[in-house]
Image (tube, rainbow, N blue to C red):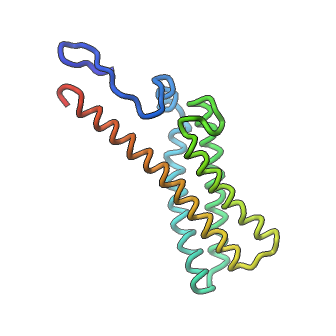
Amino acid sequence: MELGAGGQPVATPLPAGYTPEQLARRNASVWTKVQAVLAPLQFLAFIISFTLVVRYLLTGEGFAVANTWVLIKIALLWLITITGMIWEKEVFGHWFLAPQFYWEDVGNAVAMLFHNLYFVARWLGWSEQAVMTVMLVAYLTYLVNCWQFIVRGVQARRQRKAAGASLPGA
């Protein structure tokens, strides 16, 4: 709590969707830090993999390296999803679909479904071209889900900035 004019306490707004207790749990959680590391790492793997998948689809070359990066990207998506579920349980008391992250979780579920279609396509013996096309669609679902989290982050930053500007002496 900040102190305003005359030493009176001034309530600072919480990030959207958090109670004071949830915010304290979020800030204290090791999983918050894990997510902060995994998110950019996964995005970097996405950029590399996406580039290699598109290169393969355009030239027909580099399937093995594209396939390797697809597997890395899928592994990172699983890792960030599992650790995110642990974080969500710790902060909000729900393993998945907490009201505060409902649409982000729905987007993540869709992205997970499409990424895991890779394994179905490989198991069914689809062509390399078809498998990489499946991954291109999966990556589009990932981008939509990534956009959801970026929008949430921008909104939280604006909220913190507005809260700071509204405090006396800010």
Q: Position of residue 1 (x, y in %)?
A: 33, 20
Q: Nearer the viewer, residue 133 or 47?
A: 133
User: Quick check: 145 left or right of 13?
Assistant: right
Q: Position of residue 92 (x, y in %)?
A: 57, 30
Q: Residue furthest right?
A: 124
Q: Position of residue 87 (x, y in %)?
A: 59, 37
Q: Residue at x 63, y 85 (%)?
A: 60
Q: Nearer the viewer, residue 89 or 44?
A: 89
Q: Which of the 4 quarters of the picture holds residue 8?
A: top left
The answer to whether 60 is drawn above or below residue 71 in the figure is: below
Q: Residue at x 29, y 32 (%)?
A: 163
Number of disc labels: 0
Q: Residue at x 62, y 85 (%)?
A: 61
User: Quick check: 148 left or right of 73?
Assistant: left
* The C terminus, quarter of image: top left
Q: Residue at x 52, y 56 (%)?
A: 41
User: Quick check: 127 left or right of 19?
Assistant: right
Q: Which of the 4 quarters of the picture holds residue 31?
A: top right
User: Quick check: 112 left or right of 164?
Assistant: right
The answer to whether 64 is drawn above or below residue 164 in the figure is: below
Q: Position of residue 57 (x, y in %)?
A: 60, 81
